[in-house]
Amino acid sequence: MTEVLGYFGALCIGIILGITGGGGSILTVPILVYVLQLNPVIATAYSLFIVGTSSALGSIHNFRKGLVDVRSAVRFALPSVLGVYLTRKYLVPEIPDPVFYFASFQLTKATFLMVIFAVVMVLAAVSMLKNKKENPVPEITNPYGSLIQLFFVGVLIGLIGAGGGFLIVPALIKLARLTIKKAIATSLLVITINSLIGFSGDIQNNEIDWLFLLSFTALSAVGIFIGLYLQKFINEKLLKKIFGIFILLMAIIIFCKELFS
């Protein structure tokens, strides 16, 4: 039953990713950890592959429709992908276990990663629930500052194994001056580059169950095409609010489970 739920979750990840251009990926790690009982380090690695492959298929679909700004995607991916790769290749394997202990309290590596993930879930939920007003986009006066920010977005994506669409879409709107539809489409290409190159940093550090990974990814890929089709009929703002509340509740559950159980 848990396997059925896990694979159904894979389909849902793809659907939400297809509709919103981000957000669905943030469900991948909780499904892998709490439903399919994988170790968080492996789960974050698998998540990068699942999200990256699904996003690649969505990117091809959007590219054919002329919605992908390839130049902006490459410009945004270069600094962030460096952060993702270095994090997966060098930083994650070097995190000590336990990370911290005081008297009888121990903060394990697995708990540490899940707590970081829950914090990011809260930030993602807040960004989805905020009422965004149409304001003029400011000129970028410090491009180097933007590059540094994108690098640390990559580090964060590498730590939590999520695609980071909830961070990338707003950045594409503000910095690249893309419309919301083009930003969502372009974010899928950025997520593809970040996730798959980040996953390559895990291949040497972890034993990969390719049969499971490819079957889970295949369902997620089917979901992304369903999501891209449904995008035409769904009120995206309402969906984001409902999904934002759901993510917030999930973050609270993860906090409680990891720190108080």
Image: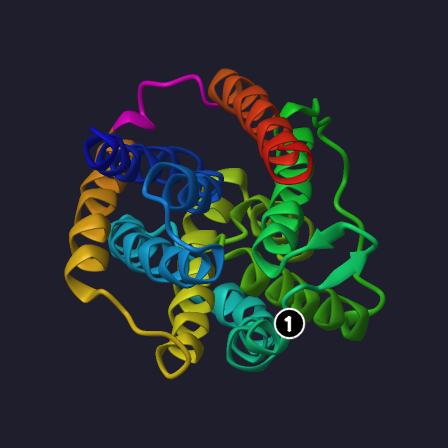
> Who is closer to the viewer here, 228 or 37?
37
Quarter of the image for residue 121 reads: top right
* Residue 30 placement, left or right of 114: left
In the rendering, at what x and y percent does residue 187 appear?
A: 47, 53
* Residue 13 placement, left or right of 151: left
Q: Is residue 228 above or below residue 193?
A: above
Which residue is label 1 attached to? Answer: 95
Badge 1 amino acid? Ile
> Who is closer to the viewer here, 253 or 202?
253
Q: Residue at x 52, y 17 (%)?
A: 242
Where does the magenta region start and end?
230-236
In the rendering, at what x and y percent does residue 154 appear?
A: 60, 66
Q: How many marks?
A: 1
Secondary element at image label 1 = loop
Q: Residue at x 70, y 22 (%)?
A: 131
Quarter of the image for residue 125 reads: top right
Q: Residue at x 55, y 65 (%)?
A: 158
